[in-house]
Image: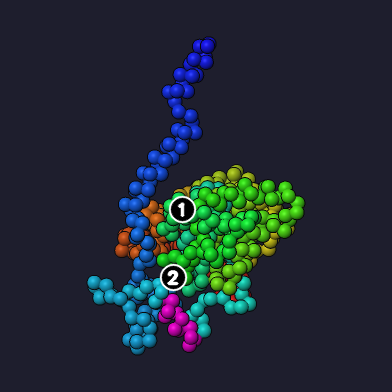
Amino acid sequence: MNSVATHSLARASAVPSLTRLIEADADLLSAQLQQLRARAFPPTAEKQLRKFMAGEAAKLIGISDAYLRLLASEGNIPEAEKNGAGRRLYSLEQIHEIRAYLSANKKGYSPRRMENEALQVIAVTNFKGGSGKTTTAAHLAQYFALRGYRTLAIDLDPQASLSALFGIQPEFDLGANETMYGAIRYDQQQRALSDIIRKTYFTGLDIVPGNLELQEFEHDTPRILSEKRNREQMFFTRIATSLSSVDKDYDVVILDCPPSLGYLTLSALCAARSVVVTIHPQMLDVASMSQFLHMTAGLFDVVEKAGGNAEYDFFRYAVTRYEPSDGPQGQIVGLLKSLFGERVLTNAMVKSAAISDAGITKQTLYEVGRENFTRATYDRAIESLDSMNGEIEMLVKQAWGRKT
Ligand SMILES: Nc1ncnc2c1ncn2[C@@H]1O[C@H](COP(=O)(O)OP(=O)(O)OP(=O)(O)O)[C@@H](O)[C@H]1O
Ligand SMILES: [Mg+2]
């Protein structure tokens, strides 16, 4: 045996194969994560939504605090729980009940869509990782649910960060066929979407969770495309077709797309009536912006050429993690607005420790109460989120042909 062979043999016995090494590392990490999670979120402790102060509840319903007090004193609405300081607290379920009570007598209190108003499917997308898609999608879905829209959030990212935000641990809480993949797969194991949808601790907000299984769609699709007889199974119709089976149950659907240009994203864009492209202005210098737009155009071109939906109710750029005091960011946002006018949402989502801190504990800012932050920090962040989401709500209402 020559010396090289002896050397590599010695190495082979001393160092395990790379595959086994990585697998062992993955197992170690997974066990550690499970332990950490078990401590932070005991398996039996399901996530619960906090209660809302009377003022918050009144604002969500769209009435004055005084009117809510009057309704409570008349005894026609559910009785509020009182906190230690004697202040009234309402659950989201109660808020929905009050809205239903009011809308029975007077139109306008329930925002639900009418028969002639189409299910509004909004894709939150950008193939750039970390541009704020999931944060935007989660807050948007919760915003709509808090205001009484029947909302469905769909996690299309195999990384499943949206599911994690909703307290679903993709590796532990999901079995096979329990993601959107189950509803859009091409084989006999396809299931009804209604069997996959889960209720969340937000009354009126349902979720289709995601996990790595979604990646299968990226592998299956090229194979199906190569079999000509399967044209009616074209990938771009899969999500739309599946959604049509639950059309009657929802007003708004929010799709959280993966950070890639794959078939899931294309299928999501074809199912969408509206698109929100998240942009973190720091990632884009002027030079890379045009490249970014060419890629966006290329994506939509693929969709159109494939015969997919090319008509959208609205298409908007949403500026995320914005730091108004950062000069270069301001310049990029200014440029975006001067070039694209109203296609850039007027209200940006500001960068805020309140939003990232809430994220660390797997919550959105709508879940964390004001008492957990300094008032100024909380107010600035929530105002920014409400303004951006309110703008999108307005666009949805316009798409429905309502006077706004
Ligand atoms: N407004 C904000 N203020 C502070 N931190 C934020 C804000 N928005 C998002 N973040 C943080 O930035 C990170 C990336 O955000 P997010 O996960 O929403 O991006 P994404 O586009 O979904 O990423 P991916 O491409 O990996 O899916 C997260 O850690 C999130 O907590
Ligand atoms: Mg994401």
Mark 1 closeness class: few <14, some 14–19, many ≥20 residues within 10 Å: many
The residue wearing badge 2 is: 203
Q: Camera-side residue: 309 or 320?
A: 309
Residue pictured at 44% horizontal, 65% vertical: 200
Image location (x, y in percent) of residue 349: 47, 58
Query: Does 380 sit above or below residue 105?
Result: above
The number of discs equals 2
Q: Residue furthest front?
A: 188
| Marks 1 and 2 in Cβ contact (< 8 Å) | no
Query: Does 355 sit above or below residue 120?
Result: above
Identify residue type, mark 1. Pro
Q: How would you classify the magenta stretch by its main secondary structure?
A: helix
Mark 2 closeness class: few <14, some 14–19, many ≥20 residues within 10 Å: many
Q: Is residue 164 visible?
A: no
Whether residue 99 appears in magenta in the rendering, the answer is yes
Q: Camera-side residue: 187 or 90?
A: 187
Image location (x, y in percent) of residue 258: 55, 51
Identify residue type, mark 2. Thr
The stretch in magenta equals 95-106
Residue 167 in which image quadrant: bottom left
Q: Is mark 1 within 8 Å of ligand 2?
A: no
Q: Quadrant of the C terminus?
A: bottom right
Image location (x, y in percent) of residue 199: 46, 66
Residue pictured at 34% horizontal, 60% vertical: 45
Q: Is residue 187 visible?
A: yes
The residue wearing badge 1 is: 170
Q: Earlier in the sequence, mark 1 or mark 2?
A: 1
